[in-house]
Image (tube, helix red, strand yellow):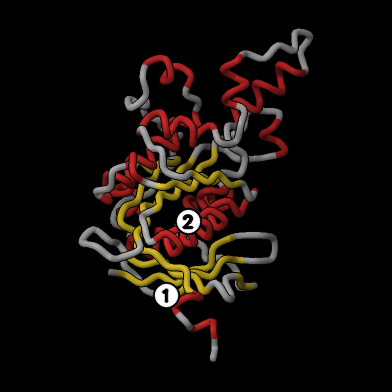
Amino acid sequence: MNHATTPAARLEAWVDGVGLLGPGLAGWPQTSSVLRGQADYTPQRTLLPVPQTLHAAERRRAATVVKLALAVGLEAAQAAGMDPAQLATVFTSSGGDSHNCHAVCAALASNDRLISPTRFHNSVHNAASGYWGIATGAMASSAVLCAYDGCFSAGLLEALAQVVLTQAPVLLLAYDTDYPEPLLTVRPIPDSLGVALALSPQPGPLSLGRVAIDSAAPYSDAAANTLDIPLLEAVRQTIPAARVLPLLHALAHRAAGSVHLDYLPGQTLATEITPC
């Protein structure tokens, strides 16, 4: 028997909702229009909304990465008709809160070397997950990953595995924020971008399509898919979380086929997209 073709060897889920915020990309409806060629792509700095779901005290302490994750996660959950308080989550980011990292490094390099409690508690990689729990009241499981430029693919693998294992919806959130100088020189992420996918084990009336991975052979040496919009392709190449864009392109077009996403050096993650 060829075990690679058995149902147990497939990781799959249906995408019921998408949230997206990035440079020139303000939500999934506008982004999907750009990806379909129905609207022009105009680069501009990412605009982050005030996280109204947080109380005033937490809102004041919320960093860029928290605002980004909350915005895309809530958009995806609302589009899918899911209660965010009930969703298991997978958070993935190449570097977490880059601005806070810069501030902590600057403090440690100064004569004072004192770090505020707010800076300290925001310095952990799972800060966005913690604020998500505060904002939504979620008490379901939450995984937090990091895989450098392959952060989205690593998160997708984890989220699909959880959907298959638990047969329950999972919210995947991938995000990156820009670095200030001098860190920008060595980690040139020019702007913030976040994406969230509300994944379900069964198709429903709101499903956009199915994402599947052959768990027996998930990796490929084929080149990653690219975008035919040069300015948007530049976003894909420079912001790790934006490696998701070819997958979103297929969902926006309701197109079936293979999509290869950047993962580890010399490898791509081979996904199959089936529209609903």
Outermost residue to the left: 205
Q: Quick check: 111 above or below 139?
A: above
Q: Quadrant of the N terminus?
A: bottom right
First of labels 1, 2 by sequence position: 2
Q: Nearer the viewer, residue 206 or 262?
A: 206
Counting labels gives 2
Disc number placed over residue 204 in the picture, else none: none
Report if residue 141 is visible in the image: yes
Q: Secondary structure at mark 2?
A: helix
Could you say which quadrant of the image residue 255 lies in?
bottom left
| Residue 267 appears left or right of 111 | left
Residue depicted at x 37% and y 46% = 87
Instruction: Look at the numbered disc 1 and give the secondary structure of its residue.
Output: strand
Q: Amino acid at mark 2?
A: Ala
Residue type at mark 1: give it: Gly
Q: What is the CA distance from the residue labelled 1 to the residue labelled 2?
A: 21 Å
Residue under the point 38% across and 37% down: 138
Report x, y in % for residue 228: 46, 62
Point out the image quarter for the C terminus. Answer: bottom left
- Residue 201: where, in percent of width, then height? 35, 63
Q: Is residue 24 visible?
A: no
Residue 268 picture quarter = bottom right
For mark 1, does the 10 Å Cα neighbourhood hold few (<14), some (14 to 19), or many (20 or more) residues? few
Query: In the rendered image, which residue does mark 1 sit on?
Result: 257
Q: Residue at x 49, y 70 (%)?
A: 213
Q: Position of residue 91 (x, y in %)?
A: 50, 44
Within-10-Å neighbours for mark 2: few <14, some 14–19, many 20+: many
Disc assigned to residue 159: 2
